[in-house]
Structure formats: C-alpha cells, structure tokens
Image (tube, rainbow, N blue to C red):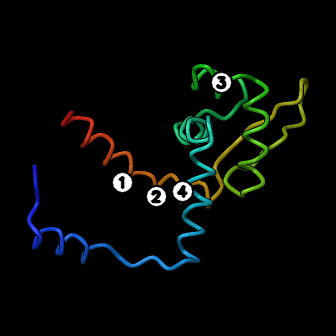
Amino acid sequence: MTISTKQASVRRNDIQHINDEECHRFQSSVELIGKRWSSGILMAIARGATRFSDIIAAVPGLSDRLLSQRVKELELQGLLERQVIASTPVQVRYQLTARGFDLMKSLQPLVAYGKRWDDES
C-alpha cells in the first residue's frame, strides 16, 4: 500500500512537534516501561495483583529476583507504592500510584495500536 505525497503531508501535520527536552523525557519513559518485565508487572498490578506471589503468578517467566529488582525500580520512579502490613507473617502489597495509573492510561493507545496492526498481519 502506498500513500500519496498529499496524504503523507496531512499525516505529518497531524503529528505534534516534540522538542529535544520532550524527546528526552519520552525516551526515558519508554526505556523504563520497555525494560524486560516492567510493563508486565505494571499490567498485573493494574489488573489487581497486589502481593508478590500474585504478581509472579500473573507474569509467566518472571523470577523472584527480577520481580524484586523491578518493583524497587518502579517504586523509585514513583509508579508503585509498597505497603507493609504488620501481621504474622508480615504482608507486603503493591499498588499503582497516581503516576502509575496515569502511565497505564497513557499506554492504552499503544495497546490499541498493537491490536489494530497485529489483526492486519
């Protein structure tokens, strides 16, 4: 399928200009969620997995060590909150922060894009 010069021009005009600072922020965000397992962990938590074992079960192939490492990174980025519940045994629960929810909302168009183009393959 080819597009005409006019169609290409219209499509370019629909794209908002991104300056260097915005590009850097975008790149940092993409690198964070593109890091192996990060998006799977975020999606699992967004779907309701709150405990370490729930997240492991929801993300096939994810090891305990990598989950531990990724939740620390995501917590440092302000995307997750870790809640320690004083009980016997101690319980740890994870939840998305407002920033994490905003990120998950922002990813919805990418999910739709992937579905749309995968369906055409």
SS of the residue under disc 2: helix
Going from N to C along the chain, the mark reached first, 4 or 1, is 4
SS of the residue under disc 3: loop
User: Which labelled disc corresponds to residue 62?
Assistant: 3
User: Which labelled disc corresponds to residue 106?
Assistant: 2
> Mark 4 — residue?
103
Name the front one of labels 2 and 3. Answer: 3
Q: Residue at x 46, y 58 (%)?
A: 106
> Mark 1 — residue?
109
Q: Quadrant of residue 101?
A: bottom right
Report the number of discs. Answer: 4
Type of the residue with mark 4: Leu
Report whether 10 appears left or right of 15: left
Going from N to C along the chain, the mark reached first, 4 or 3, is 3
Disc 1, disc 2: CB below 8 Å? yes
Q: CA distance from mark 4 to mark 1?
A: 11 Å
Type of the residue with mark 1: Pro
Dot 2 crowding, Cα within 10 Å, few <14, some 14–19, many 20+: few
Residue 12 in the image, given as x and y percentages of width and height: 25, 73
Type of the residue with mark 2: Ser
Would you place residue 108 above or below residue 28 in this image?
A: above
Disc 3, disc 1: CB below 8 Å? no
Going from N to C along the chain, the mark reached first, 3 or 1, is 3
